[in-house]
Amino acid sequence: MSSGDDQYVVLLATGGTIASRNSAESGGATIAEDSGEVLLQSTGHGSVPVKVIDVMRKGSYRLTFPDMLEICSAVRAALRNPLAVGVVVTHGTDTTEETSYLADLLHDDWRPVVFTGAQFAADHPSPDGPDNLRRAIAVAASPEAGGRGALVSFAGKIFHAAGVQKVHTTAHAAFDSPDSDPAGSVTEAGEVSMDARPARFAPLPAPRPGDDVGLPRTDVVASYPGADAVMIEAALAAGAVGIVLEATGIGNANPVVCTAVADATAVGAVVVTSTRVHAGPVVPVYGTGGGKDLLAAGAIPAGLLRPAQARTLLQLLLTLGMTRPHIEQHFHLRGSLVPQENDTMTALTPSKG
């Protein structure tokens, strides 16, 4: 715990496997129970002062978009104090790629926000949470991690939030960035090594209080052999104004789905084409129901953004009230994960305060 005028790292605890234990009261199910202080104690503390804030205590499979916004709001609040050198968010691994990406989209501070968690519960014979948290605190305290937006630190590797994916359900090394190299690494002793600092896109504005009331509905619909229009029509009937199509290959569907996409965009829905393939861009190439036809039907290619992060970006843009041309521009730019030449970039510098 920090005191006086010492600099410190803020630990925002939100639940997840790292905070979970087997509960007899829940019929033997594993549920999030541990507070942030308990998580910090499990690390054996360390040389970096840490201020703990419990934001929520949920399995990340239960999170809603307002929950994700609440976590991002807690990050901003934590960084209002100039003594805070960085933030660690303990989070369930199921949806780390969504919340960390939302945090990255909104992050307008030089100081790092680092997400971590665990694959094995706190009462597992060999829990990985304490080591992951210890290393994440070291990353958040490292000047080398500054200016990179939101990061994910897990099993010794550090990833940029944009493009990170959970790639294994049970393995210790749960995360990877299939379309980019890791941002760096952190040893068991807390030694942080980072790559060259990449440019960042300009952060998006945070939704104002009340903007998350009556959020625009945004759904993910999968394409597969024999897929028809039923799921797209059902999403529209439920009130969806945004749809992410989890297409096949480089972004393909079939003629029936393409017609349904054209009908959806004709009534004002925004459709984004992503892919179920774990790496590589969405590229409109094929006809007869392929990506060329989806583009002609009004679908916006997601670039390198997989369905989870494509939906996060689309949900945020719709919540901010952006028009289709602006949404298309954001996907064109942010779908590359990092700015290309002449793209809009931000030039955050360390605070002098």
Image: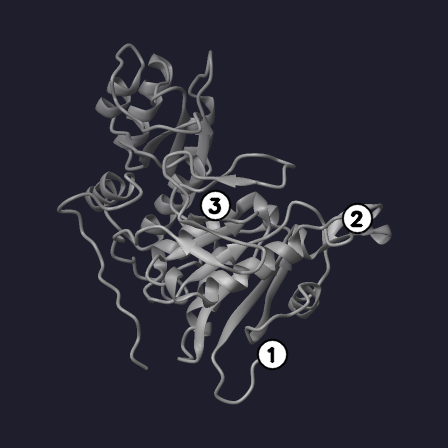
Instruction: Kindly identify the amino acid type of the residue bearing the numbered disc 1.
Output: Met
Q: Which of marks 2 and 3 is nearer the N terminus?
A: 3
User: Measured along the vertical axis of the image, is residue 161 above or below residue 291?
Assistant: below
Instruction: Kindly identify the amino acid type of the residue bearing the numbered disc 3.
Output: Glu
**Disc 1/disc 2 C-alpha distance (Å):** 27 Å
Question: Which residue is at 55% across, 66% downward?
Answer: 12
Q: What element carries label 2?
A: loop
Q: Can residue 50 be seen in this view?
A: yes
Q: Is mark 1 on a helix, strand or loop?
A: loop
Q: Which of marks 3 and 1 is nearer the N terminus?
A: 1
What is the total number of numbered labels drawn onto the structure image? 3
Q: Residue 45 lies in what quarter of the image?
A: bottom right
Q: What element carries label 3?
A: helix
**Disc 2/disc 3 C-alpha distance (Å):** 27 Å
Is residue 260 toward the left or the right of residue 190 in the image? left
Q: Where's the N terminus, which quadrant?
A: bottom right
Question: Which residue is at 29% across, 57% downward?
Answer: 204
Tell which of 120 and 301 is nearer to you: 120
Residue annotated with mark 1: 1
Q: Where's the C terminus, which quadrant?
A: bottom left
**Disc 3/disc 1 C-alpha distance (Å):** 29 Å
